[in-house]
Amino acid sequence: MEGFLFSASIYLGAAVLAVPVAARLGLGSVLGYLAAGILIGPVLGLVGAETKDLQHFAEFGVVMMLFLIGLELEPRALWDMRHRLIGLGGLQITLSTAAFMGGAMLLGLSWSVALAVGLIFALSSTAIVLQTLSEKGLMQTAGGRSTFSVLLTQDIAVIPMLALLPLLALPKAVTLDGDGSINRHLEDGHGSAHGSLSLVADLPGWGVTLVTIGAIGAIILAGVYLARPVFRYIHAAHLREMFTALALLIVVGISFLMMLVGLSPALGAFLAGVVLANSEFRHELETDIEPFKGLLLGLFFITVGAGINFAVLQSDPFAILGLAAAVILIKGLVLYVLARASKLQGRDRWLFTLGLAQAGEFGFVLTAFSLGQNVIPVALSERILLIIALSMLITPLLFILMELIDKYSSDPAVQAVEHDEIDTDGTVIIAGVGRFGQIVNRLVGSAGFNTVVIDHDIKTIDLMRRFGFKGFFGDPTRPDMLRAAGLADARVLVVALDDPAAAIKLVLYARKERPDLHIIARARDRSDVFRLYRAGANDIVREMFDSSLRAGRYVLENIGLTEFEAAEAERMFYAHDRHAIRELAEVWDPETTSGENKAYVARAKELERDLEASLLTILEARRSED
């Protein structure tokens, strides 16, 4: 018992220390877990032989991950995305697998081992790439959407891969040498089914097929007809822990059924998730399973890191590093060809190419699974794990490289699109015409005033023109574009750019050129408000402020206040917030986060107390009058 508690403390402590640091550095949680495992394993030697036993338990986190992926994929949504998934994603997996398989066979591996290697390296890191896309605001770009489609295809493809890999396993009479070549021995056992539960161990081929189809059909029928009555029965007990128990029972029970018929537990979990995706209890399942999935999957990555044999890297560092670079290069070439074929241009092309060029966390899963199924030898698996980890560690550098290429790109496809010549001027200049800017443009234009709209996204401008709105393609932060748009005579400048740094740059220049110009700027949060305020903007509108304020008024109207009282509270809150912003701007420090700025925190608390007192006073006075 003491040994178990000590090991648990080591694993959890390493995760708590390493993962937040990796997240703050922008490396992602997966790399944090790997680093934690490397620290307590190869570096400090705090864990040892129990790692492999623990890894079998932690692999259940992968099963839960695939169940949650299935819950997010409604059959209708999958069908609507079929062209992109099968086309772009399917080609990426097929071509990458073929390229890596060919390279592995040239290095002397047998075709079955080479195919397993190709499947492992064809996958990219969903966790790292999606987190990076979200942090950099690239998810809605053409390159970001294409990248997401490929990642989704890869996640789905893990299921057939897990089903295929056991078919590549060599019989018990065959083992693998360290280099993956075949070494044959005399049969010394009675089959893998000996001593384990199995419904198909002694059945003929047609019997195995029937039992397998029956098991899959049972999962589908239970999900369609049995799930709702069972969930309603559990709901009647009004015990939260019973929902958690049922969610775990679904995953564990289906995994056990799949093992009985000789299939991958992950396949059954994914299938059950897809079947339950349309259920009204889907969100309950996600909420209950997510914590277990996160902990077990994190534990799995820690055990992978702890099990990495760095002696292999020390024994032949140039070969391992060269193979890691070759993986990124080969995969990058395949992705670049697909990007060109998909007509991705400029930054989107490089985002797609470099963003997916690494190996991924599912590679660890497939490697461990292949090793357990006697598909690849131990020595080769140790090299594969090192190559995957190194490629993932290089991923942040690939995104930096993408930004450098984008900055100094000489891509003729990008240069071919020249900025428009602005042949008109207006009372109002609108810089940026996304969801925010287009509403401003429609309102002002409908009132009979002329606007000059400038945006750096040619697709957005083309879409505007299709609907009869006039706009100009160009960089609104460029002085020549602003002068051509009539900055010298304009009365109002609306800064509605997505990029906060570009917005501040534009406000600074416009205020310098036109001290009398009225500047209205869009801000994401209070920090942006303070920066724009110091840059010289007159009116600053936070993206979510007005809509949130209106939602709050609706809440007050439906919990007892009259419409007039709710409107008064909304008006008071709005006026107080404008006053508070000016007050807090005086103590805001751009070099310190708001939570660590003592003067800011103290003043914010004072202003919040003032707001509560003012609202209560007004509401009490209004009720007294009534």
Image (cartoon, rainbow, N blue to C red):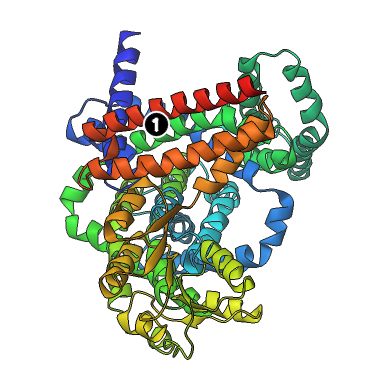
576 over 625 or under it: above or below: below
Q: Dividing the image into 4 quarters, which one contains the C terminus?
A: top right
Horizontal and vertical percent position of residue 288: 58, 27
Residue 215 figure quarter:
top right
Camera-nearest residue between 462 and 295 = 462
Seen as rendered, the residue at the extreme right is: 225
Residue 77 in view of the camera: yes
Considering depth in this image, is 433 or 483 the residue closer to the camera? 483
Which residue type does callout 1 highlight? Leu
Q: How many marks?
A: 1
Estimate how packed mark 1 is, as few (under 14), some (14 to 19) or many (20 or more) residues with alpha carbons within 10 Å: many
Residue 63 to residue 101: above or below: above
Name the side, left or right, on which 620 lies relative to 297. right
Q: Name the residue furthest top.
A: 1
Instruction: Classify residue 258 by image quadrant.
Output: top right
Q: Nearer the viewer, residue 536 or 122?
A: 536
Q: Position of residue 320 (x, y in %)?
A: 24, 57
The residue located at (67%, 25%) in the rendering is: 559
Residue 101 in the image: state x and y as whole percent.
44, 64
Say what secondary structure mark 1 lies in.
helix
Where residue 63 sits: x, y (%)?
55, 36
561 or 234, nearer to the observer: 561
Residue at figure coordinates x 60%, y 73% from the top left: 445
580 versus 624 height, above or below: below
Q: Residue at x 36, y 39 (%)?
A: 580
Asked if residue 131 lies left or right of residue 446, the reply is: left
Query: Residue beneath label 1, please?
Result: 299
Residue shown at the point (79%, 40%) measured from the top left: 217
User: Residue 331, can we see it?
Assistant: no
Image quadrant in which the N terminus is located: top left
